[in-house]
Image (tube, coloured by chain):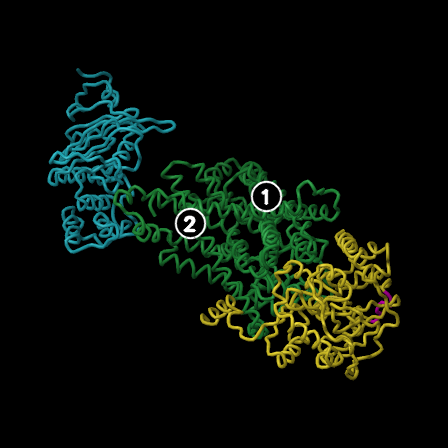
Chain colours: A yellow, B cyan, C green
Amino acid sequence: MRHPILALMLGGLSSAALAQAPELTVYTYSSFASEWGPGPKIEAAFEAQCHCDLKFVSLDDGVAILNRLRLEGRHSPADLVVGMDDAMLADARATGLFSPHGADLSALSLPGGWQDDTFVPFDYGYFAFVYDSSKLKNPPKSLKELVERPDLTILYQDPRTSTPGQGLLLWVKQVYGDQAAAAWQQLAKKTITVTKGWSEAYGMFLEGQADLVLSYTSSPAYHRLAENKQQYRAALFAEGHLPQIEVAARLKSAPHPELAQQFLQFMVSDQVQTLIPTGNWMYPVTQVALPEHFEQNELPAKTLSLSETQIQQGRKAWIQEWRQAVSR
Amino acid sequence: MLIADELTLCQDDWQGCFSLTLRRGEILGVLGHSGAGKSTLMALLAGFLRPDGGRLLYRSPDKVEQDLLPLAPAARPFTSLFQSHNLFEHLSARDNIGLGLHPNLRLNQAQQAAITAAAQRLGIAELLDRRPDQLSGGQQQRVALARCLVRRQPFLLLDEPFSALDPALRQEMLAELASLARDEDIGVLFITHQPDEVRQIGERFVLIEAGAVAWEGSVEELAAPRGAAVSRYLGLSAPAG
Amino acid sequence: MPRRYWWLPGGITAGLLLAVGLGPLIALLSQAPLAATPLWQDPYLRQVVIFSLGQAALSTGLSLLLALPVSRALHRRRFAGRSLLLKLFGLSQVLPVIIALFGLVAVHGHGGWLARLLSSLGLSLPQYLYGLSGIVLAHLFFNVPLAARWWLQSLERLPANQWRLAEQLGLASWSLFHHLEWPALRAQLPALAGLIFMLCFTSFATVMALGGGPGATTLEVAIYQALRYDFDLQAAGQLALWQLLLSGLILLLHHRWPSEPPQLKVSDHYRRQDGARLGARLHDGASLALVALLYLPPLLAILLSGLRPELWRALASPRLWHSTGQSLLIGTLAASLALGLTLLLLISSRHLRLRLGRRHWAQGLESLGNLILVLPSAVLSTGLFILLMPFTDVFGLGLYLVVLINALASLPYTLRTLQPAMEAVAHRYDRLADSLGLAGLARLTRLEWPLLRPALGRAFALAMILSLGDLGAIALFGSGELQTLPWLLYQQLGSYRLNEAAATALLLLALCLALLGILERGIGGKDADCR
């Protein structure tokens, strides 16, 4: 008992003392870096070609990554971040912490195209509420129905830490406009809890804590392909769905800028993009083939969108509106 | 000889000024009401309290005078014996006596022998390996006396050392103390509440009142007081002469 | 150390404490000037303040209300398991909060014991564990035992002759309560209520784990969220100052009714005779059953979690052992720092008090150690964060900051443990030691160490257990690499991974209990118990 603990304690003190290869530090969200996420495979593949030590530091969720960077400022030990999304770009840009990616993005085939010299997209998806069709027989057909029906229970994520939570914030705002506060209050009544990250909410949903959980249209594919379970479905809403594009970027203060650039290029390579569908359970951003049965009539018929400036101007006020409405 | 000359202590609500002398081999009784300043006098002599004025001198047999005031308590020619807590509870009787010889208990053979001799002298040779909580009150004070013995200091300051003991035991200890002072030529300052004890073993006494020596005399005066202060203290109505 | 340098250890420590207190305070003020904090104009701030005070008031009131009949019943009855129950009650103060929360979730949560029991009867359990009701439930769990024990001791301190007299006068149960018990209980009421209110007002882990989103957020948690969720330094500073103001106010009010907790020792026991009537039996039975149902199942759930077969798989998780290592490292460092600071302070304050007779100065010096009561750890951490941010990567220093905050948080307790012991040694042996020339190293090894060892052991164990249970500091400074057991447990509870949480809770509990035993014996020596 004594020696392993001693070793651990010493290990905690001098974790970086013996590193010979350069260590590339990547901030990401927990489900990306977890053993069942795409992180470990990406790490192995990149380390095989970079002669470096890739280290994922997992934070609660995408928004928490930016919060952490802002708290650390230019003293951050990170080289890269993976897992912020398109809704955060304005805020992220405003920090002045990121440097241009310098990567060749000609292979991208995103639905709306991509023009940005700082942020590199690596996957995309559509926010959706996921349910278990063996338990919930009549899922809501619209966001309005979800908000108004009294018999449903939901789990979602905190918009201050999590990109899906932030997505829902924008979604509700776009559908309800000035009535958003009232909608949040109605939602609060059926909310089991607001979690910090996607993993917690989804884990609680799988344990049967709620009828619906905020996730992605592509989430049921995981259950079909990885677990051979057919009962999970994404509820498609009549108002349309908000897309999410997840991005990676390197920091101005990165200790290893060249390696970081190399990693960004690597993120849009076929090698990584083929890992995305069955690793992160999202859509790849290049023309790699999707696995069989990944798609099953789950692409939303209608998509919504907000501009970067709209989000930048409104976000803080919307968060306060949400915070105020759900604390009543 | 010990000479205290107007040793003065000024505190917020109390003031004292003491003058007295003590010879080697002599037992001087110190009497007085509670709060009169008996224990303060002893603390001033021993160096536990720093006086605000006055002198404290030690005149050795060869007439050399030494100023005691700058000296730390342990460097002064005294050994003190209190009413209680004279022993360290966590140390054996042997170590408690040994501390009188060397603060770190690194003792040579001669010092070990001195401990044994002192213990034999006080009849506690069998008890040396016990700890204070395994000794009776009388035995504890004997251990403390044994430490006074090995320290070989010319003066002994006693603050009601036997007041917690039974009458019979107290008599025994008084006799022990008297013979110790005589045999070893030790000057004893003996604070007590009991005039009888002073009459029994002392030669002179001082009476402390309100922070000063109010009367000084021979022990016979305790039977027939000459000063008003002594009569008052003894509870007699008027001086008898 | 030569005696003329007596002021050095305390002086250095005092300077350090003042710097650690004032630096963050100035950083907070610069971030959020007091004048610019219009409480009633910011609905969110108002909501948070009202909720903080409201939940604390509700928790305090209910705790006292429930503890009152329980303490009477415990005083009136002798039954099998009574002393065990009292021992378990004592546990509520030592047990890290997050462990108890695990027990509460295992019993009251979705799919917990209660839900399963009800569903086997065809009923469904309403959702009450998250939000105000859950927070109050947890606070009752911690504070009903505390109050009941405290009041029981007041009752046991009533002189036996008063009971005999009352019995001779034939006073009925109600009159007994009115004339005998209530005055004794009321005397302790302000102090007890103040303590419980303060504990609930600053309760961090409970609100974090059971708060269930922004609807139930207290100031401490709001500070944490403003900093870590919103990166809103100004809001964090403003909230921290409000927390400072309010807790200072509560402390001040509390100080106006000083009363010591009653002593444990009771010389004269008397078995009161008024418990035989039916009314008294019903009263006692009901209140004891209620408190047993509140308190025992969660404790049992923690212990029984050790029987789960999944435990062994969870114990193999490297993350668990990494957290254990970090917890032990932080705990050891924090306890050593706390002990060091305490000793340095006390060396000087003891000299001031006993040798120089400056009682008030000594008290003033010692009260610096209670810094954390005035500057709660959430406020201090936030201030430190804002202070250090411009200069360095705060998360890189996370370990040391957590150690510092934990050490400061346990200072009041280590001071209270060591101060009487150190003073007793000096009081009893100073003159003897001086007259024998026992000073310096000899005094340290021959006198202070052997006599202080038991108290040192207790203080170290106490500080380490407090640090092992900390969630506040680690929540702010923790990161992927800096993980402690409570933080891991909090995350596992947050995502309902109860099997893994069970292993973490059990390990943390075992560590705390083992520490309590080993450290008291190890440092305390073989006679640690008899002092």
Which secondary structure type mostly characterizes the magenta part of the structure? Answer: loop
Check the image and report above or below for C528 versus C506.
above
**Residue A29 visible in the shown view:** no
* Left/right of residue A245 with respect to residue C449 in the rendered view: right
Amino acid under disc 2? Leu
Whether A140 is among the magenta residues is yes
Question: What is the count of numbered marks?
Answer: 2
Residue at 31% x, 35% y is B49
**Residue B202 makes an appearance in the image:** yes
Badge 2: chain ID: C
What residue sits 44% from the left and 53% below the top?
C339
Residue B15 found in image quarter: top left
Amino acid on which the number 1 mark rests in the picture: Ala
- Tell me where the magenta segment starts and ends, as one range: A137-142
In the depicted structure, whether residue B66 falls above or below residue C59: above
Viewer-nearest residue: C144 or C472: C472
Please report, as a chain letter, where disc 1 is located.
C
Q: What residue is disc 1 on?
A: C193
As helix, strand or loop, the secondary structure at mark 2 comes to helix
Disc 2: which residue: C343
Marks 2 and 1, the one that precedes in the sequence: 1
Mark 2 in CB contact with mark 1 (< 8 angstroms): no
Locate residue A77, reporting x and y percent: 61, 65
Query: In the figure, residue C3 lies in which quadrant?
Result: top left
C-alpha gap between disc 2 and disc 1: 32 Å
Residue at the image position 66 percent from the left and 69 percent from the top: A80
Residue A18, compared with residue B36, is above or below; it is below
